[in-house]
Amino acid sequence: MRTTLRTGRAAVAFAAVAALTLAGCGDGGGNGDKDPAGGGSGEPTAPGVELPRLNGEKIQVTAVWSGPEQENFVKVLDEFEKRTGAEVTFVPAQDPIVNFLGTKIAGGSPPDVAILPQPGAVKQTVDRKWAKPVGAAAKAELAKNYSAGWREIGQVGGEQYGVYYKAANKSLVWYNTAAFENAGAQEPKTWKGFLATAETISASGVTPVSVAGADGWTLTDWFENIYLSQAGPEKYDQLAQHRIPWTDPSVKEALGTLGELFGKPALIAGGTDGALQTEFPASVTQTFTGGEQPKAAMVFEGDFVGVNIAQTEAKIGTDAKVFPFPAVGAKPPVVTGGDAAVALKDSKGAQALLTFLASPDAARIQAAEGGFVSPNKALDLAAYPNDVQRSIAKALIDAGDDFRFDMSDQMPQSFGGTPGDGFWKTLQDFLKNPKDVAKIQRELESDAAKAYKS
């Protein structure tokens, strides 16, 4: 259950992230502050992409986004309404979104457009004959604005179904600069250095690492970054496609490495129990509140962390900085993810919205809010609110078609994308007890074998 992916050399593709991101950390641009030197407000100027008039047409859009991410996307939908005259409603979805859509479709009320967070979910909607092919106008925007690799991720059987509106670099560690300075800590480049930095910060009286254990997807991202760097791209692809089992020695090694952190509750905010009750937004905000005594000094996750930092008083580039996920093997890992818009109704409104989302006009609006990166190569980097965001976006665009996509997003959703089950649940069990690696491997293999057969 997967679509064709351009999964090239991740470490090479995003090698520029380290230098670019670190260079950007000196930027004083904060939460939503536009860089005067950047040349552009991030707001849409004169309408660019041509859209039809849809006076009074009602359109429903659904996604699993919530909080600031949802609010920022609604601003994009508001602009679409202004340009077309349509009435757009955002419908919050639950994970797994394919199950949510199934309920809506069975009830006779499918949304017009769904934003899907996994290529496997796009494939499922096509297999179930829910998804409608992308129309000519949206295809033209994709051809102008997207690399071949990003177009291909949204294809199933050679037909375009998805428009990848949002991308993510999921290999970043964000840190509280005051906590680092007080501890005399430096940005680590290796996993060994990361653990040493954690111990240094702990000795200063601040818990070093915030872990969002209540959200299993963040735990899969921890594993995937370690596995990609340690086992290498070839093994990564094999495991993602279940061409090697989860009982493979490379999985044992990666889990053992992750256990070097998870096995030390004193290094984790709230300990193991606290981490398992911490959802992703709280894992970020507790790192950047509390002045010189935050609940944690570091939090791992993608560029979208910026949205949650914006809910605090911290300013990105001064109070909050970022470094690449440390190298476990020869090279630091970079894992990317993304969200694709798919039409579930063959309507003029649904196709017009896909066209808009494939344009730089839509991306410009959400880019200005921070915590968002677009794979749209036609988007002016000046739209991003600070140098940190600009550098991450530039690295993504400069990578072209050479990238590794999030492993769990490539898997059948029943294994790689379901809360309380499969990959997510087993890594939560691992966080509870990281000592019995063999048992965790057996559980992962059992669940994967069932999922890939279905």
Image (cartoon, helix red, strand yellow):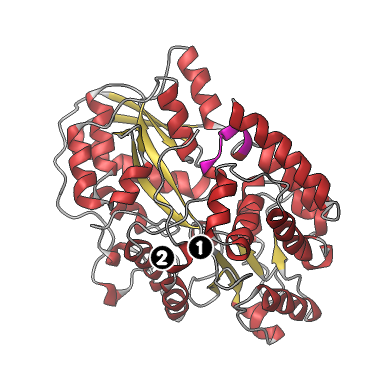
Q: Position of residue 131 (x, y in %)?
A: 37, 25
Give SS at disc 1: loop
Residue pushed farthest bottom?
184
Q: Residue at x 43, y 44 (%)?
A: 339
Magenta segment? 410-415
Q: Amino acid at mark 2?
A: Ala
Residue 437 within the magenta-colored segment of the rendering? no
Mark 2: few/some/many CA within 10 Å (<14, 14-19, 20+): many
Q: Residue at x 51, y 38 (%)?
A: 64
Where residue 252 sits in the image (x, y, percent)?
74, 55
Check disc 2 and report the residue beneath it.
Answer: 13
Pointer 1 residue: 334
Q: Could you tell me if the residues under marks 2 and 1 are in contact, i.e. CB atoms within 8 Å?
A: yes
Above or below for 261 versus 126: below
Which one is in front, 270 or 166? 166
Image coords of residue 331 (percent x, y): 55, 72
Three-letter amino acid code at the position of disc 1:
Val
In the rendered image, is residue 285 in sight? yes
* x and y, in percent, of residue 118 in the image: 48, 40
Quadrant location of the C terminus in the rendered image: top right
Is disc 2 placed on a helix, strand or loop?
helix
| Prevailing secondary structure of the magenta residues | helix
Label 2 and label 1: CA atoms lie apart by 8 Å
Q: Please report whichever mark, 2 or 1, sits nearer to the chain's N-terminal start.
A: 2
The front one of 345 and 362 is: 345
